[in-house]
Structures are given as C-alpha cells and as structure tokens.
Image (tube, rainbow, N blue to C red):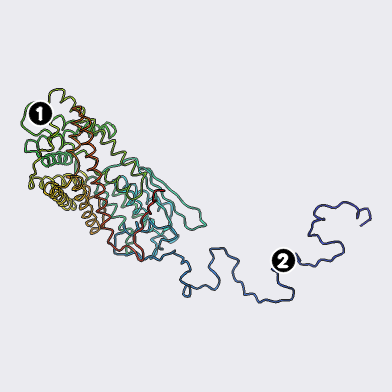
Amino acid sequence: MTEAEDRKPQSDEARMAFTPPAGIEVGDSESETTSEFALPTGLDVPQPPSSEPEGSAFTTPGGYSVEDAPPAFTPATGIPRISLTKDLPWQDRMRTMLRMPVAERPAPERMPKVEEEGPAVPRVLDLTLRIGELLLAGGEGAEDVEAAMFAVCRSYGLDRCEPNVTFTLLSISYQPSLVDDPVSASRTVRRRGTDYTRLAAVYQLVDDLSDPESHISLEEAYGRLAEIRRNRHPYPTWVLTSASGLLAGAASVLVGGDLIVFIAAMLGAMLGDRLAWLCAGRGLPEFYQFTVAAMPPAAIGVALTLTHVDVKASAVITGGLFALLPGRALVAGVQDGLTGFYITASARLLEVMYFFVGIVVGVLVILYFGVNLGAKLDPDAALNISPRPYWQIAASMLLSLTFAVLLQQERSTVLAVTLNGGVAWVVYGAMHYTGGFSPVAATAVAAGLVGLFGQLMARYRFASALPYTTAAIGPLLPGSATYFGLLSIAQNNVDKGLVSLATAASLAMAIAIGVNLGSEISRLFLRIGSPEKRRAAKRTRGF
C-alpha cells in the first residue's frame, strides 16, 4: 500500500470504537469481546451434554420427571386436577368445564373418536353448530346449548374449543395449541319452532356421543341428525287445534267458569288458532299472528255479555289468553339472564314484550268496541272467584296436558308433566286460597317446585328439563291479571289497569325465577367435581 493510500480517509466502519488499533494482531476467533460475567481464561467448567436445542418458557425443565415433580409444578392439564363424576349427566359435566378457563379444563380421559389420520376439525365444528342450531331453535337456554356444543367437540377430541351463543347466532372456535392458528365457524338461526320431541332426540344424540363406550363416527352422527330433521311432528294439525281449545276451556274453569264458559272459551281459542295459522301461511310476522289469535276469545266474551247470557264473560276471555301467553320464551329469557347471557336474555325478553303487546292490541280493540256498544264488563270480577279445589286441580292437569301436546312433547313425558302441573296448582291454591299468601309469593314457590321436579326427572332420564317444566307452569300464567288490566284501560281507568298489568308482570317474573331457582337447587346438592364445585361468575360488587 502506498503512502497516498494510507492518508486516504477511511469509512466509518474502519473507525469504530471496537476496531483494534493498527499494529495489534487479532486472533482467528470471532470476537475477543468479554464482559464482567465471562469466565477467566484457563478456568475449565464442566458442561452437561446438551442433546436438545435451547427451548422456550414452555419447554419442560431439564432433569424433570413426572414421578418426582414437586406439588407446586403446574401439570400439563392445568390446575386444579378435577375428576368429574362420571355417573352425572353430560349437561352437568360440560357446564362445569365451560365455566373453567381453557388451561384448567381436565384433558379427555379416553381416546377421541376420530379416524386414523386425525379429526376433521371443520366437519366436527359444522356438526356441532348444526346440533346447537336445533337446540337453540327449540327454545333451549343459551348455557345448555353451549354445554351441548362443548360435549360434541370434546367427544371427538377437540377439548380446546370455545362455543358462543347469542339469540340468533352460534359460533365456535378451536385452537389446537398455543402456537397453532385457531379455526372458527358460525351459523345463524333464522327459523325457530317448538318441537320438544325433536329436542329430546337431539339430546339423545349428544348423550350417545358423550358416552365413553359408544363409537359414533362423524358420518353416523350426520345421518342421525338428518333423520331428526326429517321427522314429522308427533301430533297432526287438528290435534293441536283441539288442544288449544281444551287449554282455553281448562283455563276458564280455573278462574270460575262453568260448562258454557268452557265451551265458549274452547271455540274462541280454536278459531283464534286457525286464524293465526292462516296468517302464518301468508307470511305475516308473529306479532300480527298473536294479535289476530287474541281477538276471537275476546269477541265471544263480549258477544255473550251483549246478548245478556248469564255467564262469566271474563272467564271466557281469560281462558283464551292462557293459550297465547308466551310462558316458554319468558322462562328461557329470564334463565339466560340469571346465568349471565345478558345479550340473549335481552333479545328474548324483547321478543316476549312484542308478543305481549300483540295480545294487548288484539284484546283492547275488541274490548273498546264492546264497551262502546254497551257491554257490561266488570273489572272487579277477579275478586269474586270462589275456590273449587277438585275442579281446579282437574282443570290444571288438563291444561298442562294440552300444553304438552301443543309443545309437541313425547308421549312418554306427557303423564309426568301433567302430574307436575297438578302439584303446582295444589301448592299455589294451598298457599294463596287457604294460607292467605300473596299471589306472587305463592306463584314463585309453586314454580320453584315445578323447576325442582322437572330437573330431577330430566336427570333421571338424562334429557332436557324443558319438557318437564314448560307445560307444568301453564296453570300459573297470569291470564286473569292481564285481562282485567286491559279491561280497566279500555274503560279509561288507566291507573288501575297499569297496576293490574304490573301484577301480571310480577307473576310472570315470579314464574321464571322460581323455575330457574328450582333447577339450581337440584344442582346445588349434587357432587359434580372434586375438589371444586360448579363455578359461577363472581359478583361485581357494584363496580
């Protein structure tokens, strides 16, 4: 190198602080830079043989063995190790795990039912959504739908899944591990219908999938689900119409009606049911169907009053209202709210409000014309109802029986729900008429027994509790308070009418809360897991 080249300006890299000065020889190693933590030269420290590359925070520590693990070490399946009682229904086991964080859920104790090449995750998720759709469309609560969806996924080995249920949307997400991409799917529930026979068949399918001894492939599960969808309703249309009429007649006997009132209420309800079917065939929304169905019983009651027939017209109208009050949707909405599904609960309660407003509009239109035509309708007739225990018990059982038929229940469950409805009315009558308790308190206690007995029957048969509870609350529905409130409003006594409607709303809430409380009491004393019980959300304490 020439002298001119030595004087040439060098780059910034040549003048770095770590560049050795000229004239100092550097060895062949990559770097001689050391720190205060480096070992002095010449000190040999034996290094353990490294057979595996450097791991991460999730790598098992070197020298660790499962047998000699200290109790404080987090097990692979999470803390705590919970062994769920196997003789309980799958609903309770799945509900318990749904309320745990994903990392704390116990791993499946058996081999998943999958093919040799592994689970077809998209197909399992699709099957899960289709099953959840049938349950949600049939009126099942959001928590029970999530439990069923989780049971289906877990039966095929997908234990790290998170189902999510709202009023019309079902979604589910599955993540194989912390480093894998999640797989998500969703499905919209566009049509809802009441068929408890189909609901029971879906529950049986989920129960078979959750059975450790059964080995149902995806194709077999899809085939059974298709058969459930194709099955027709167990009762034809004329049976449903007759059941609607008998329900109204039985309800009129509960509020003091005689044979003529029974027949009049029956005819009015049957006519209203046929008009509602006609509106449904024309594509009208359910709001107008309820409005049209509420008019014939009210019109027959007003007509009997105008013709001076010595009958209790209020019992005719009240009996017709019993067949229309949306008790099933109300109970499901309150149950979703009590279990923490507030969006679904709000949507269901809003639906109930729309149905109730439709009934109000239909009855008010008829009552308004009847009052202007000179019909002598007495809003204080509710105070003159004389208890007739034997007739009322028989009417309450007939009402529950016909309600079960309208809900398309299995024939094997009709007898149980009929007896449950009779017991509910006996408890209500004993507390209200004999004991002098308020109607709200008596209704809440009777509804609580309905929920308790219904949940016990469902556990005995490993089925849904809805077929054993929904029809049994029929005799407790607030038909009388609703009618007399509307009559007072039609007679320009708005304050009195609003008080009566508020009483009807209180009775409805007492029914819903009582049914849910009875179901929770039945679960309260059952051993679900060890060492912990069924988890619930913590109270927010106002903040």
Q: At x 34% / y 64%, what residue is drawn? A: 529
Question: SS class of the residue under badge 2?
Answer: loop
Q: Relative to residue 61, is residue 410 depicted above or below?
A: above
What is the number of the mark on residue 35?
Answer: 2
**Residue 189: percent from left, percent from top:** 35, 43
Image-based side of 180 in relation to 157, left or right: right
Disc 1 residue type (three-letter)? Thr
Disc 2 residue type (three-letter)? Ser
Rounded to the nearest angstrom, the CA distance separating label 1 from label 2 is: 105 Å
What is the number of the mark on residue 12?
Answer: none
Q: Relative to residue 186, is residue 155 depicted above or below?
A: below
Question: SS class of the residue under badge 1?
Answer: helix
Q: At x 29% / y 49%, what residue is drawn? A: 227
Q: Which residue is mark 1?
A: 305
Image-based side of 406 in relation to 524, left or right: left
Q: Relative to residue 141, is residue 54 depicted above or below?
A: below
Judge whether residue 131 can be spotted in this image: no
**Residue 308: percent from left, percent from top:** 6, 27
**Residue 247: percent from left, percent from top:** 15, 41
Q: Which image quarter: residue 153?
A: bottom left
Say which of 483 and 453 sits in front. Answer: 483
Judge whether residue 423 can be spotted in this image: yes
The earlier-in-sequence mark between 1 and 2 is 2
Image-based side of 429 in relation to 29, left or right: left
Q: Relative to residue 389, is residue 371 depicted above or below?
A: above
